[in-house]
Image (cartoon, grey):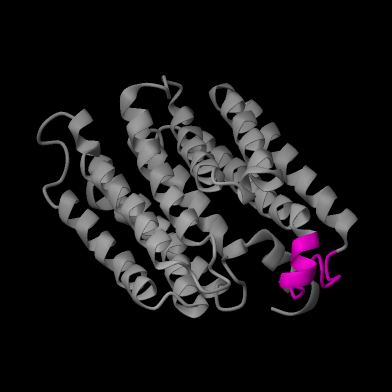
């Protein structure tokens, strides 16, 4: 990737958009409409991708002053993407994501909520103690967006439990990443890791809302395996909280969301849910050129 294409891929955080797709795929497995309503599934995938990428553009748009001093290599402060173009792109992606949900009426209000949560996070909450919670809320809403494709009550307890699992995980990841560009505070990293661990506790209990015997016996072992996969990097960063180690843990945790979604999907559709892991391949490949954090 070179030139303008790379600049826009960096602005959109293209590797990360596959985590948004994974959210929708997992939620669609949980709601049971992937095979019955593939058109709805495709629309919500695209809508989620637009909203996610739009949020990434807004992130850099609102941070352009800070980035000019601390991260001048980024697309906007480096001049590779003009400010006006970034503004238009962010607006277009957000509007496009919301417009797509007009084809799925139950998803429309959730899409509007995602836009509100993203703007609040990027413009204000990011630099406050509520930043991680705000980011987790965005991911929580993205799961609800996927669940809305079935047309049922997305505010029912099982749906909220599932969405809270991913949302809480992202709260922990965002907290862990808050000072990734400098020397991080070991105590803060430990607290963030505890939040991520609590999310895995929620994950293990997702099957409590299902009929006995309908969840594969290997499900909790997959949750533990995921915890080990992410935990290795997290523990290494806690032991040596420098930028390199923390950023490696954050990257593993963000892209690891694809694995978490795949594991959660197996609670509903068995081993078929592991197909979501295929989304990790393009994310990993694109991550060779495009940063994720």
Task: Give the camera-side residue of 288 and 116.
Answer: 116
Q: Which percent across, then down, holds residue 57?
A: 72, 54
Q: Which percent across, then down, holds residue 191?
A: 36, 55
Residue range (magenta): 65-81
Residue 125's image quarter? top right
Residue 63's image quarter? bottom right
Q: Which percent across, then down, holds residue 135?
A: 54, 46
Residue 35 visible in image: no
Q: Residue at x 83, y 65 (%)?
A: 81
Residue 287 visible in image: yes
Q: Residue at x 79, y 77 (%)?
A: 3
In this rendering, is residue 227 above or below 33?
Answer: below
Q: Residue at x 58, y 43 (%)?
A: 48
Residue 228's image quarter? bottom left
Left of 26 or right of it: where is 58?
right
Dominant SS of magenta comes to: loop
Task: Give the camera-side residue of 181 and 225.
Answer: 181
Is 74 included in the stretch rendered in magenta? Answer: yes
């Amino acid at each position: 990737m070179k030139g303008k294409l790379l600049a826009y891929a960096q602005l959109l955080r293209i590797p990360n958009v596959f985590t948004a797709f994974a959210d929708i795929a997992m939620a669609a497995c949980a709601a049971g409409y992937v095979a019955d309503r593939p058109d709805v599934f495709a629309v919500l995938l695209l809508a989620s991708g637009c909203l996610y990428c739009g949020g990434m553009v807004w992130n850099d748009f609102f941070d352009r002053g800070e980035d000019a001093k601390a991260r001048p290599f980024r697309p906007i402060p480096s001049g590779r993407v003009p400010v006006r173009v970034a503004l238009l792109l962010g607006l277009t992606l957000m509007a496009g994501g919301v417009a797509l949900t007009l084809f799925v009426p139950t998803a429309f209000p959730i899409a509007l909520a995602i836009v509100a949560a993203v703007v609040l996070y990027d413009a204000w909450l990011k630099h406050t103690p509520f930043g991680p919670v705000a980011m987790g809320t965005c991911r929580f809403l993205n799961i609800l967006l996927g669940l809305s494709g079935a047309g049922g009550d997305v505010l029912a307890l099982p749906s909220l439990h599932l969405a809270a699992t991913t949302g809480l995980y992202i709260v922990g990841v965002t907290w862990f990443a808050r000072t990734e560009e400098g020397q991080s505070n070991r105590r803060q990293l430990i607290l963030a890791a505890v939040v991520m661990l609590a999310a895995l506790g929620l994950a293990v209990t997702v099957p409590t809302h299902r009929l006995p015997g309908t969840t594969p016996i290997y499900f909790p072992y997959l949750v533990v395996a995921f915890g080990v996969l992410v935990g290795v990097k997290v523990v290494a960063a806690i032991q040596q909280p420098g930028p390199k180690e923390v950023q490696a843990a954050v990257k593993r945790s963000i892209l690891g969301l694809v694995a978490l979604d795949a594991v959660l999907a197996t609670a509903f559709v068995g081993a078929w849910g592991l197909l979501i892991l295929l989304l990790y391949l393009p994310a990993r490949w694109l991550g060779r050129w495009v940063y994720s954090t």
